[in-house]
Image (spheres, rainbow, N blue to C red):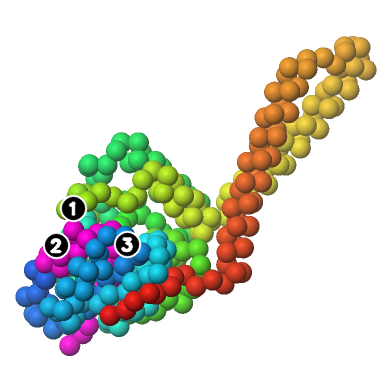
Amino acid sequence: MSLLSVIVPCYNEEENVPFFYEELMKNEAFFKEKALEVEVIYINDGSKDGTVAEVKKLHEKDERVHLVSFSRNFGKEAAMYAGLQRSKGDYVVIMDVDLQDPPSLLPEMYSYIEEGYDSVATRRVSRKGEPPIRSFFARMFYKLMDKISQAEIMDGARDYRLMSRQMVDAILAMTEYNRFTKGIFGWVGFETKWIEFENVERVKGETKWNFWKLFKYSIEGITAFSTVPLTIASFMGVLFCIIAFLAIVFVVVRKLLFGDPVSGWASQVCITLFVSGVQLFCMGIVGQYLAKTYMEVKNRPIYLVKEEL
């Protein structure tokens, strides 16, 4: 028999933990048909509610349920990495506990693995139920990443992905502290089949991803898999040096030929403020990359485990 590892990151998902388990186990007949043993690894990412207690209840009923509980909230990226490290399966799938990643897709996904694909990934074809502004910026982010990054990142891509052990080992070989898993999936390569599905709303509770968290996450993705912003900063520096040089030549020539006095303190202030703003913006871009380097060289662990079943 082959082993399927199901990785389930959780943060304050007390209500959804049992619902997810019930939905997943509706595939029990499929698992038996394909001779698949299953292990379900819940990663508790520093939850403040009864998430741990709910997972322990499931563990008492079913020894295939495992728990890895962090000492605090380290973020979903750390939770997924911990799950991949703990997984022992020949095949590994990452799923959200709120059932926005439908377990009913697993039979179809596995069929493509049997055809020879290394991974089967999912993407939403609609964002029904999301705020329009958030949907707009999300689409812009994916378009931008497609232009500036060498890693394949599909619009609407989910973390819901079924992978072979070979691909999982390749991902685990990337031990970087600043993790952007969607980019890592694309960077490691391997033959991937994409499945499309309609957006599914959460069963219980509210999303933990607000606009500000998503914005910071997008910055992580851009700086993790592209150096184009640094190129833009360099280009802007050169461009403004040329403009400044041409402006000086223009002022000197006008004074020598026409005797016009240099005037216009208001326009000078505006130009100074604008150029200063561009300089600070470019310094901010460099600062983002420097901050990433700083965190990498400190060599801190990506997560810390408090309890494990």
Q: 142 left or right of 63?
A: right
Q: 6 left or right of 244?
A: left
- Circle 1 residues within 10 Å: few <14, some 14–19, many ≥20: some
Residue 67 rendering spot, x and y as whole percentages = 27, 75
Q: Marks 2 and 1, how far apart in space? A: 9 Å
Q: Nearer the viewer, residue 73 or 40?
A: 73
Counting residues from the start of the chain, the first of labels 2 and 1 encountered is 2
Q: Residue at x 49, y 50 (%)?
A: 219
Residue pointed to by mark 2: 19
Q: Marks 3 and 2, how far apart in space? A: 17 Å
> Which residue of the protein is positioned furthest toward the left in this rendering?
29
Per the rendered image, the range of residues in magenta is 1-23
Q: Nearer the viewer, mark 1 or mark 3?
A: 3
Residue 244 rendering spot, x and y as whole percentages = 78, 32
The dot on residue 204 is: 1
Q: Amino acid at mark 1?
A: Lys
Q: 182 left or right of 6?
A: right
Residue 22 rendering spot, x and y as whole percentages = 11, 67
Q: Nearer the viewer, mark 3 or mark 2?
A: 3
Q: Amino acid at mark 3?
A: Ser
Residue 235 rendering spot, x and y as whole percentages = 67, 44
Q: Quadrant of residue 265?
A: top right
Q: Is residue 192 visible?
A: no
Q: 254 left or right of 296?
A: right
Q: Marks 1 and 3, how far apart in space? A: 16 Å
- Name the quarter where the N terminus is drawn: bottom left
- Name the quarter where the C terminus is drawn: bottom left
Q: Residue at x 34, y 50 (%)?
A: 209
Residue pointed to by mark 3: 47
